[in-house]
Every structure is written in C-alpha cells, then in structure tokens.
Amino acid sequence: MKRPLGEPERWSDRVPERSGARSFRVPAEDDLGALFRRVREATLPAPLAPPTTAAARARGPRWGRLAGRLALAAAVVAASGGAVKAARSVWRAIAPRPQSLTVPAGSRAVLSRRAHRKLTVVGPARLDLDRGEADRLDLTLDGGALTAEAGDEALLVEVNGLKVALPAGATGRVAGARGTLPAVDALAGELRVAPAADGRSIALPAGHRWPEPAPPVPRTLAPTAAPAAAAVLAEALAAPGASPRRPEEGARRGAREDERGATSEASLLARAFHAARVDRDGDAALRALDERERRFPNGVLANEARVARVEALLALGRASAALPLLLEIRDQSQGLTRGIQLARAEILSELDRCREAATDFDELVAAEIRDDADERARYGRAACHLRAGETAPARRDLERYGELYPDGRFIAAVRRATRDLGPAAAP
Amino acid sequence: MRPHLARAVSSPPSAPLPAADSAVDTDSLYRAHASTIARWAVRLGGPGIDPNDVVQEVFLVAQRRLTLFRPEGGRITTWLFRTTEKIVQTARRKQRLRRWLARWAGPPPGLGEARPVPGEALERRQEVASVYRVLDRMPERLRRVLVLFELEEMSTQEIAELVGARIGTVRVWLFRARARFIELHAKEEET
C-alpha cells in the first residue's frame, strides 16, 4: 500500500519478514502489528438492528420537579462555586424534558440513568416518564419487549397493566402486545408478578416464565377449510344458469381447460387450489393467482381467489402475510367458513392477539358442532385464557375439552395444564 | 475545533456530507453513520462497551441538538465522532467506577460474562481485554490516536480532521503513543 509522504507505517499492515532476511525492524513492532490485526478483527461490532432513533415528545416541566432541580442547582453552586457549572445546572433544570417516549417498531431505547440499573425497551412501545418516581416505570408495549436489570435497588415495572416487582439484583424480560397481559421471564433472581387488581402476587423464580407457555396451537388451514373452500370452488365452476354438474364432469372440464392453457378464471383458480393442496407448492399457487389477478382484475371469483391465496401463503409458512387477507373475510358471502375462522383465530392467538382471536373461537364453540374446528377452537381458547392468566375460564375450557374429546389430539396437554392449575377455588 | 482545517482536508471514507442548506434529519444520518459509530464505540471503548447503547445515545443527542449543527462549521462526521467519544468516555468512567465498587460489593448482576465461549474465542477475548488494559493506562489523547490509526486504519490526515488537530501534531502523538504502548505492553506481559 502506498503511503503519502511522511505518513508513518501502520504496524498492523506489516507483512511478516522471511526468516533469516536482514532486517532493521523492531521485532516487537511486528508482533504488536499482528496483535492489532487480531484485535481489529475481534472488535468488529455485530450488525445493528435496523431501527431509527426513538422519537421523544417533549412537554413543559412540572413545577415540583422544576423547584427540585433549581434546589439541586443551588446545591451544586454551593458545593463547587463554578459559574459555568451553575449556569449548566440552571439550564438543565429549566430545559424541557420528554415526558413520554415513543419507541418505534424495531428500535431500542436504553434507560440507564441510575447506577447499576438498566432498562432496554425494544419497540413498538411507549414509555411514560411522567411519574416522577425513580423506582417505578410505566410502559405500554405494543408487541415490543422490555429487559430490566434492577441493579442494587428494587424496581417496580408496570407493563400493560401488569405489575412486575424486581428485587435488587434481579433481571427480567417482559414482552407483549397492547391490550393483553404480557409474558414475563425471570432471567436472574426471583421476580414477583401481580396480574390481579387485588394486588396479590405470584413468585417467579429465575429461569421461569409467567404465564407458563401453552402447548403450541396447530395452525394449518387444512383439513377443515380445504373441503369447504373446494365446495365453494365447485359451485363457482358451474356456469350461471347451467344445471348442476357432477364433480367428475367438472374435473374433466377443468383438465380440458388446463390443456388449452388455463383460459378461464375458474381454471386458473383450480390450478391454484391444486398447487396449494395437492402439490403443497405455495409458489406455484401464488403464480397462478397472480396470473388470475392480471387477466381477471374484476373477476367474479375474487372471494375464492382470496381463500386460495390464504392457503398458498399458509403452505409457504407465511402466516402473518395471510392474516390481513383472513381479516378481510367477514361473512359467508365473502367465503367465511369454520375452517377460515379457525385458521384466523389460531394465527391471531400465536401472534399474542388473543383478544381478537376470542371472537372467532367463541363463535366456533358456540355453534355446538362436534368437529375438528370445535376441538381446536376449545383448545385454542383455553390456551389464550392461560396466556392471559385467566385461570377460571381456562379451567372451564380445559375441563369441557376433556369431557367432549377424551381421546382428542390435545388431551395430554390439556390434562397437564389442568393439573398445573391445581384444584378449583371454592365458590 | 478548527473549521478552516476541517474544510482543507480530503473527504473521509464514510458517508457524504449533507448539503449546506439542507436540514440534516436523524433518520438519514442513522442510515449513513450508525454502523461507523458502532465500530468507533467498540474500538474506542473496548470489550465492555455495548455499541448499541452508544449508538442509541449518540442519536438521542443528535435528535436533541442537531438543529444547532451548521454544515459550514465542520463535517458531520467530526461532530458525530466527538459525540461518540464523549459518550464512550462516560461509559468507561462508569465501568471504572463499577469495577472499583465491585471490590466491595461483588460483581454486578448480569448474564453477559457468564455465557460459555469456545476455547479460541475465549483466547481472543482475553487478548482483546489485555490490549485494552494497556490502552486504558495510556493518556486519552495518545490512546485515541493509536486506536484510530491501528484499529480503525485511518490516515493521520483523517485523524487530524476528526480530532481537530494538525497532522504534524497527530504524528507526534502517534509516535509517543506507540512508544508508550510498547512500554506498557511489556509490563503487562511480565505480570
């Protein structure tokens, strides 16, 4: 590497010399160069998360706090006597401070103003800094998370209405969405969680989680939705006014159209359903649906196409992309079936949006139809109640599941959860 | 700070300067400079520094005070470097204080250091810690120049621009820093 005149040679750029060659170099410098090279490699920081900075909203200071700050400034003046320091303290006292902090999605806000205490908030979240109490923090998480280290003083954190007390030395992580009780992980030390309004708290030892994670809820749309959507499609394939065609006839006609290069909207949809259900090829299904969108932007089978796209996305494991489409389906005229409701509720509950999932779960259970959707809905609703710490309704759902489906697919998990809840409290 | 000198030197390797008449917004600043600031933080502060914390702090300061920045008064990179340096210094001071307190109160709670690491990574970590122990015993001015020159691979001209000193002065500091480092490193190895 060519250096400008007078530029010193960088030790870490030196190439080791051949042994035996005559050298005027100091060996220690070569060694230190190699050492710096290694340190350079070792101190490359990990890629940062893609956040932007947290946007703080500033409001005017409170008079009480202002008076306190002025008193502090006076104390500083008395202690140090420095005019510059005094001016700085006065400015700090009167300068507007943010009273709340909005942390956007993916951003991190770190609060470590007090010795040994560290609070890291990952957005989306909103911090309420208006309390004025040093040992407590109010936070609304909207899908974000908080990691709190209490340091050498106890700390009380209220997140989405849930009180979490961290004794000195404890570390905890709280994660949740707006409108739901968050999940708490005790990383170090024993935390206390107070979910109920009466202030009763539960001890959470290190390494434990509250509420205990519910067994995973199955999510695929098949098999309940598939036959329903297939029926919708079969109806759609029949030409308006034509006499009902036998299924084999429809299939033969679909095949003929496929041979001609998918000339109709229905045959493109049939191809999409076939790819999603039989071949489990979500990409091919999406291609067929995109083709349909392009050729028939105002096609009459828009509702069926939406269902097919949901199935294709689920086949690809893209549940969060399927959810907005599922949320668009409101009634039977738009293709709402028990399968669709179940898939939507299960995805919502997986995303910790149990409150929204509850409507679908409730409707499925209320229909009193003993089918796969009913079984899964009962299980999913119980899991949601457990996550929210609602033990009484959770127990009701678990017990009812045990009665209705003694050989059901989730029976082992249901029995375990019922046992963990313990005996029901006396009325 | 010497604005006339800052304007005289060539452009730094990092992101382009904002136009003199345009408002500098923190989002574009973040996209352009966050990774550079994280690297400065790690290299200036050593293994105990969390680069994410420093980046966060720098951009909180930027959000608050960027309106005071005048492009004609110097480069934005210089401003960001100075801010990063101050925040890193504060973090190092806190670390020193905690180490001092830990002699009486035991180690502070946390999980970071308890994580098991493979043998080679452990060796590398110890080597890095040893280099930073030596650097921490050096005067701040010399330490900073040595880190920027050897670890950040900046030229003396770029360093002069960042720290607001003459190139000749930077070279003198570098010479002294190297001599001091050799001396302290030898002592470190003896112990």
Image: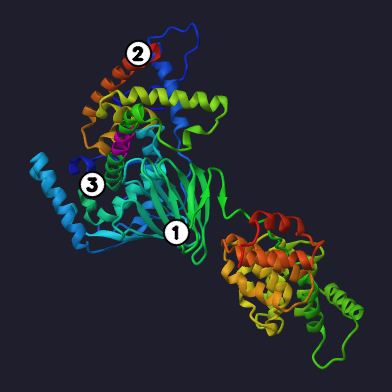
Left or right of residue A425: residue A121? left
Which residue occupies the extreme front position in the image?
A426
Q: Residue at x 28, y 22 (%)?
A: B177
Dot 2: within a 10 Å radius of its alpha carbon, few (fewer than 14), some, or many (20 or more) residues? few
Q: Mark 2 and mark 3, same subunit?
A: yes
Mark 1 lies on a secondary structure that is: strand
Residue A159 — which label?
Answer: 1
**Residue A13 sits in quarter:** top left
Report the amino acid beneath label 2. Answer: Lys
Q: Which residue is mark 3?
A: B74
**Residue B65 sits in quarter:** bottom left
Q: Which percent across, then down, holds residue A118?
A: 39, 45
* Residue at mark 2 to residue at mark 1: CA–CA distance: 51 Å
Quadrant in which the N terminus of chain A is drawn = top left
Do we see residue A409 in this rendering?
Answer: yes
Q: Nearer the viewer, mark 1 or mark 3?
A: 1
Name above or below for residue A293 compared with residue A29. Answer: below
Q: Which percent across, then down, holds residue B62?
A: 30, 52
Earlier along the polypeptide chain: callout 2 or callout 3?
3
**Quick one: A419 or B18, which is closer to the camera?**
A419
Left or right of residue A351: residue A162? left
Report the amino acid beneath label 3. Answer: Gly
Q: Residue at x 19, y 52 (%)?
A: A92
Q: Residue at x 43, y 54 (%)?
A: A107
Dominant secondary structure of the residues highlighted in magenta in the image? helix
User: Which chain's residue wears label 2?
Assistant: B
Q: Mark 1 and mark 3, same subunit?
A: no
**Residue A327 sits in quarter:** bottom right
Q: Which percent across, then down, holds residue B148?
A: 34, 32
The span shown in magenta is B88-95
Q: Nearer the viewer, mark 2 or mark 3?
A: 2
